[in-house]
Structure formats: structure tokens, C-alpha cells
Amino acid sequence: MRHLIDIQDLSVEEVDELIHTAEDIIENPEKYAEACRGRKLATLFFEPSTRTRLSFEAAMLDLGGRTLGFSDAATSSASKGETVGDTVQVVSCYADIIAMRHPKEGAPFAAAQVSRVPIINAGDGGHNHPTQTLTDLLTIHRERGDLNNLTIGFCGDLKFGRTVHSLVSALSRYTGIQFIFIAPNELRIPDYVKENTLDPLHLPYREVESMEEAMPELDVLYMTRVQKERFFNEADYLRLRDTYILDPAKLAAAKPEMRILHPLPRVNEITVDVDKDPRACYFKQVANGKFIRMALIMKLLEVHA
Ligand code: CP
């Protein structure tokens, strides 16, 4: 039985295979409409979500399966003190696969130790978000045709932004990747990402505070929201939340073929008039999220079209 807790749980070949399957699903959705007939996906969301939970549910429905779960820990027996381990042992009696989001880092890993069915990490605290990473990789692949040889700028809350940590880890296994981390001092990329991923592989990266300085070099600009829910005090959040606001004037310095990604939700960091720029890919990214999750569910359930 396979779980997906960290993007490194999948080999590069498996990631490439998932991208290939997702692209086939996009072209031939009818081929996959019965692939999970009779199977159930449980979504256990102890933290808010729009895209991840609904795209998982849409993915299972489009594979012919069914879904159950909760979207608020307050409506589950976690509110009475039930542990994650006990919750997962219970739900694995009712479902064939579980997607779990939890505010505590490592909670999906702990769940996987006791689960009788595959566990998918749908975001754990400020740590990892591997299925967002699969979504991001599919989007970059569809936009550029290749995951190698690109300069990517990560901008915003690189400290708490779990999508950043997972995507850096994933891209570290491709060739010719240059990382530019654009963040204020308080929200810099964590040392553990540099020490565990970038430094051992001698990957080129630099840290800057100016978005304008990095813009002309970038093939991909990965914007992120300042993660209000991870701050210890509101004053720091208010001071930092509008550090970077991408607008058409700033985009004037970007390459015509640059692509703008954002895992969403956005708050203020991309103005709505950027949405009509052909370089803006964040709503395509949302759509891609369902297709790559369909491919992942099939892989972990070991079913074929
Ligand atoms: N990208 C993402 O994780 O969005 P949600 O929080 O809406 O699931």
C-alpha cells in the first residue's frame, strides 16, 4: 500500500507518469469515467479549503467513485478529543482512500502509520502540500512542455508557504533549475529547505527582497499569500501582508513567455487586472488540480482506465 505524504514519496518517473496520465484524462475524460466505480474517497479536512477538498471530490466523482468526509474539525469527533490516529482507523473502515488536511505538521504521516487505506497529505501546517505540487508541475509542463531548464522565482511568504517547500523539493530533481527566493527577511525560505534540499545538491539559488530586481530573469513567477493563520501576532501579519503586490506595471519588465502561478487563495498579492494577462496561469492551475488528483487516486488505488 502506498501513501503520499511528501512529494519525494514519488520518484521522478512516477511524477512524470502522473503528468502523462493527467494529460490523457484531459484529452479523453470518457475513458476514465468508470475507473473507480464502487470506490470511496474520504476527505478529512481539519483546516479550511476550497480548491483541494473540492478538486479531490470532483476527481473521485469524475472517476465514477463516491465521496464522504468533513470539512470542519468542529463537526467531527476531533472536537470531543478524538486523536488523528483513532479518526483515521475509523474512517479507513468506511473508505478506500483518504485525503487529509491538518494544521499540525506531520499529522498525515502519523495517520499513515495506522491507516488500512492510502493516505494523501492534502496540506500539513506550514510543512508540505504534495498534491498542490503535482498540480504546479502539471501546469508548468502544459505551459512550457518541459520541467527542466527554468528560472523560477518564489515570491511572498516562503517561511510558512507549504506549497513552496514541496515545489522546491520536487524541482530539485530536474536539471537546469535556478531558484530565486523573493521575500522579506521575516518570511525567508526556511534553513531546513536550504540545508536538506538545495545545498547537498549544489543547486543554484539566491535570496532577494526586490520583486522588480528578479522579474526580467524569470521563466516562472510563483506568487504566494502571506499565511495569516500561521502568524503568532496580528501586527506582524498586517505589517507584512502587502509587501508584494503584482500588477500590470511590474509585469512590464517580465519576459513575454513568463508564466505566473499562484496556489490560491489570493488576498492582495495579485491585482485582478493581471488575470487577463496571457501569462497568468493560476486559474488554469486550479483546473489542472482535478486532473492530476484523478491520476493520483488511480495510482494509489492501483486501478486503470
Ligand atoms: N491551493 C490550496 O491548497 O487551496 P485551498 O486552501 O483552497 O485548498
Image (tube, rainbow, N blue to C red):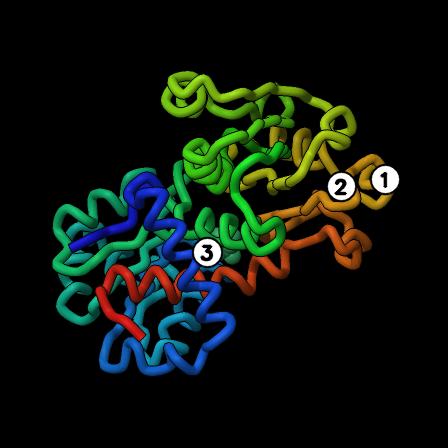
Ligand 1 within 8 Å of the CB at mark 3: yes
> Quarter-wise, where is residue 278 in the image?
bottom right
Give the SS element for disc 2. Answer: loop
Q: Amino acid at mark 3?
A: Pro
Residue 167: where, in percent of width, then height?
47, 39
Give the label on residue 246, or none.
2
Query: Which residue is the site of mark 1?
Result: 252
Q: Which mark is residue 173?
A: none
Whether label 2 touches label 3, CB < 8 Å: no
Identify the amino acid type marked 2: Leu
Q: What amino acid is labelled 1 in the image?
A: Ala
Which label number is shown at residue 48? Answer: 3
Of pointers 1 and 3, the one earlier in the residue sequence:
3
Q: Nearer the viewer, residue 242 or 293?
A: 293
> At 20% across and 53% down in the image, what residue appears?
2
Residue 156 appearing in the image: no
Mark 2–mark 3 Cα distance, whole angstroms, equals 25 Å
Regarding mark 1 in the picture, which secondary structure is present there? loop
Query: Could you tell me how far apart the alpha carbons at marks 1 and 3 are, in whole angstroms?
Result: 35 Å
As rendered, which of 252 and 159 lies closer to the eye? 252
Which is nearer the N-term, disc 2 or disc 1?
2
Q: In the rendered structure, which disc, 2 or 3, sits on the residue that comes first in sequence?
A: 3
Q: Position of residue 177 (x, y in %)?
A: 54, 31
Q: At numbered mark 3, what does the secondary structure look like: helix, strand or loop?
A: loop
The picture places residue 135, in percent across and down from the top left corner, at 49, 54
Q: Nearer the viewer, mark 2 or mark 3?
A: 2
Disc 2 to disc 1: CB gap under 8 Å:
no
Q: Taking 159 as reference, is 5 above or below it? A: below
Circle 1 packing at 10 Å, graded few (<14), some (14-19), many (20+), is: few
